[in-house]
Image: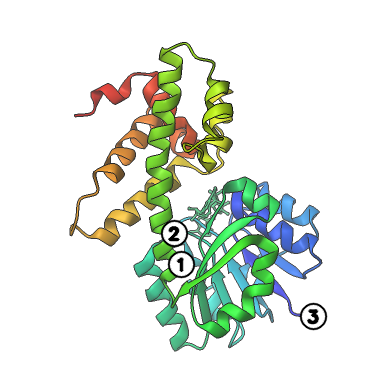
Amino acid sequence: MPKHAFLGMGIMGAAMAANLGRSGLVTNVWNRTTTNPGIQIAKKAGCNVTKSIEEAVNNVDFIFICVSDAPDVEKVLFSSEGVVENAKKGSLIIDFSTIGTKAAKSLGLRLKEIGLRFLDAPVSGGDSGARNGSLTIMVGGTDKDFSDSLTLLKVLGKNIHHCGPVGSGQAVKLVNQILCGINMVALSEAMRLAEIQEIDPNLVVEICSTGAAGSWALSNLGPKMIQSDFSAGFKVKDMLKDLRLVNEELSGRENFSGVNLAQKLFELAITTFPQGQGGLKGTQSMVLAYKNGLQNKLP
Ligand code: NAP
């Protein structure tokens, strides 16, 4: 039976690895910080916890990665104790992290040169989608690598799309992040206007989610805003990373004022928490920028 490795037991990685474990797939898991609660989530689902990348990828055919940003994926892959030093030739690396189009293309080329296969496969659907195995997965890579991975990806997601060559998954994901980031501005303003008009905010979720204004954010994050539950889900620091990646992709060619506005509002939301905490909160915390009148400071 083929063996699998999953590197990065954060909110998303742990939930995804747990789904592989529960499906009876032999899955070695590794996380940099051994106290991350994700390790226990994966262990309870039947995954084998390993102490190093070397141990995790030893003799496996598929290597999944879900860490934060491009430099983190690079470190997991290319450090002296990383994947490249220890993976068997021909293994297929599938990276779920959101790292941007350019980084994925560059990693794909470097890995190909040394005989390793690579798919970029960023995901959408949030922590709940990762837990339920209902993620949307946007895949970039060759037809063969995509078809070889499809059975496994179907354990993790419901909507698996082959977008084109390596980098294409990230390209679609950056588009997705514009929609998610700016949608949060709309959701925060909608909730604030309901509050100003003394309307029960539960009505906003109940009524607006059934009409043309419905969205994943309204249905899933609207209730969290109402309960003042600002725990992540999807961390503000990661949304800011993704909007930064959008701007890097634009590289000054065009100015997307919606993206820039969302960026500023997320930065303001961070300031509503004690230092260092705001970036680790969920993206729904943007509503706090409005509750605190901070949006009035914007030009
Ligand atoms: P998270 O909970 O913060 O987890 C990040 C993981 O990355 C942790 O396991 C962390 O390990 C690991 N990591 C970070 N830097 C590392 C490095 N240099 N070397 C090794 N490991 C490193 O984040 P997440 O929410 O799971 O998100 C992971 C990725 O999925 C991100 O790219 C994010 O943008 C994307 N994503 C997230 C969501 C969501 O709803 N959460 C949805 C779609 C896509 P430690 O425990 O050692 O810090």
Q: Earlier in the sequence, mark 1 or mark 3?
A: 3
The kind of residue tagged 3 is Met
Name the residue nearer the viewer: 44 or 207. Answer: 207
Q: Position of residue 173 (x, y in %)?
A: 44, 59
Name the residue nearer the viewer: 109 or 157. Answer: 157
CB within 8 Å, label 3 to label 2: no
Q: Which residue is located at x 62 percent, y 85 percent?
A: 88
- Image mark for residue 1: 3
Residue 123 visible here: yes
Residue 229 visible here: no
Structural distance between the alpha carbons of marks 2 and 1: 6 Å
Neighbourhood count class around disc 3 (C-alpha, 10 Å): few under 14, some 14–19, many 20 upward = few
The kind of residue tagged 1 is Gly
The kind of residue tagged 2 is Lys
Task: Give the SS element for disc 1.
Answer: helix
Structural distance between the alpha carbons of marks 1 and 3: 28 Å
Structural distance between the alpha carbons of marks 3 and 2: 32 Å
CB within 8 Å, label 2 to label 1: yes
Residue that mark 2 sits on: 173
Residue that mark 1 sits on: 169
> Does any atom of ligand 1 lie closer than 8 Å to the CB of label 2?
yes
**Residue 285 appears left or right of 271:** right
Which quadrant of the structure image shows residue 229? top right
